[in-house]
Amino acid sequence: MKKTLIYASVLAMTLLATSCKNALEEKPYDFVSPDQVGTTTEADAKLWVNGVLNTLNSGSFFQYAVYNRPLEVDADDITGKDYAFQAMGAGNFQSTSDINTFWAGPYTLIERSNYAITKVSSMTIDEKVKNNALGQLYFLRGWAYYMLVRAFGPVPIFKKSVTEGESTNQPRASVPDVYAHIIENLKTAEEKLYTRTTSGYETGRLSQEAAKTLLAKVYLTMASGALKGAQVTVMGGKQTERVGNIVRRIPPTASTYTKSVVAGHENFDAAQYFKLARDKAKEVIDMQKAGSPIDLFSTYMQTWTIANRGKGEHLWQMSAISGSEIFGNFLSYHYVGYTLPSGSIDGNLYAMSDHWYELFEEKDQRITEGVQHRWRMFSSAAWHYYPAKDSLKVKNSATVPTVEGYQPTDLYSPDQFHTAKLSKFLQVTDRNVQRSDFPFPFLRYAETLLIFAEADNEVNGPTAEGYEALNKVRKRSGASEAKGMNQQQLRSFILQERQRELALEGHRAWDLRRWGIYLQAMNAIDIDANNIIKRRQEKHLLLPIPLNEINGNTSINENNPGW
């Protein structure tokens, strides 16, 4: 693991409390070394937590738009500019430095968490305040290992900081041992963290509700990976067909796959961990019903307003500062583009496919408002529209005004520029800058509800309680209620609901992997409509360990299978 000097970079106000408007307006920032941090106040403890949290804004994660590529682009439903998919998006994992970041980022977070845990533990401050700070650090350490084990399988475990003498030459721990360490950290976080209703809780901070949700998600990953012989139906397959000399786009088709057991999950008791996932998610739902302010916003797009950052269903968001070279990110620029002086957009490298768009009912807010239907492209004054099937709306818009604001002169072409660009990424302070302040949504209460619905279905089959959780997510967006399915149908439907609700929030590639259907779903596409290679082999089930880690760690002598 790369040795790193630990710095707590902080703003004059509480930096990563995502809803602190005044903090985000502060321009100055300071770099504070560990020796300068006191040991007797709540503010001192916050400095340590902020220093660890700020890792997410750094080059180890989102500062240079690197971490989101391996997190996101290796999935069946994402598409975009073909050149942006030449490495991770085309299965060329070992040819890209993104893998180095996907390994080194979590380990930097772990190193800083380990060191901060030691420092905060020795503070002479109020015990509740100390525990809440420690709870955030244990949460971050558990999350970092969860990201690593899903991607790389067996990975080294560092119980203390390298700064404090831990050897960098740690062997890879088994998948079960890594999960045991994750669970230990998250249980500690769950015990120590404030709830959202605790006096002293600050809006936007990690809370017990977030720890319980992440723990439920970990249990769900273990259970679904271990389940044997289950079937999952996926809407996907070939995206184009040739008719004579014409290549045309085609709608998705349903394919049912028998899942594989995920490597390292063979000895997990799937039934036990599904029940643990169900019960832990239920605890969060019960907290909401008892008054925790984590409920869904009343409409889908309210979820993404600047005013609602860190509030309501946002259990954990990364904060950012618009225009800042250090605390800004490229998420909005890459996912919807930024606005040039001409009014046209530049960027928009990654988006959702036509097949993803076809998963929705016609009036679902997640496409009526959640997808950008009209924009100006390049430096011309021409307006373009999406999707192609709205062509009649566009043609008749002179006499029948449309909700989307279409004009008869709007243009469409079946190419990589006409994709489902998600409107949530438009919700930034300034669309005229590349580095903006979109807060990456790591955990939302919508996912808590979907975790419960998925786990409940595996434990009990379809139940009224499971449908209630699922339909709460659907009804918020104006979708019809789900009902009348058997267990296999509901399993597939819930996974598809995750596809709809959580698009470009770092989930789809890992849902395919944990359910053991990654290879089938990807290979059914082969090459997508924008000429992006989706073909995969067994080796792609795990990412390769970076060569600099293998060369520098004497306890690791081989890479993952096939790499």
Image (cartoon, helix red, strand yellow):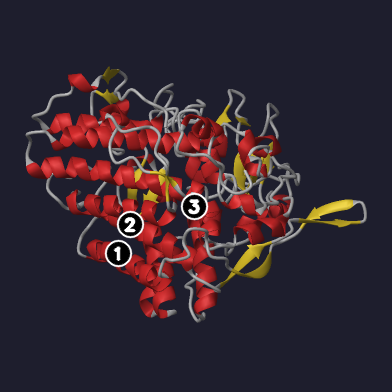
Q: Which residue is mark 1?
A: 280
Q: Reading the chain from its start, which is encountered first: label 1 or label 3? A: 1
Q: Nearer the viewer, residue 421 or 258?
A: 258
Q: Quadrant of the N terminus?
A: top left
Mark 2 and 1 residues: CB-CB less than 8 Å, in contact? yes
Tell me the number on the disc at residue 215: 2
Residue at 45 percent across and 29 percent down: it is 63
Q: Position of residue 333 (x, y in %)?
A: 54, 33
Query: Which secondary structure lies at badge 3?
Result: loop
> Distance between the Cα atoms at labels 1 and 3?
20 Å
Q: Earlier in the sequence, mark 2 or mark 3?
A: 2
Q: Amino acid at mark 2?
A: Leu
Residue 436 picture location, percent across and down: 45, 30
Q: Earlier in the sequence, mark 2 or mark 1?
A: 2
Q: Position of residue 35 (x, y in %)?
A: 19, 20
Which of the 4 image quarters holds residue 456?
bottom left
Q: State how far apart marks 2 and 3 are (Cα).
A: 16 Å
Q: Residue at x 25, y 20 (%)?
A: 32
Which residue is at the front of the view, 265 or 365? 265
Q: Residue furthest right?
A: 244
User: In the image, what residue occupies the spot 73% across and 42% down?
Assistant: 411
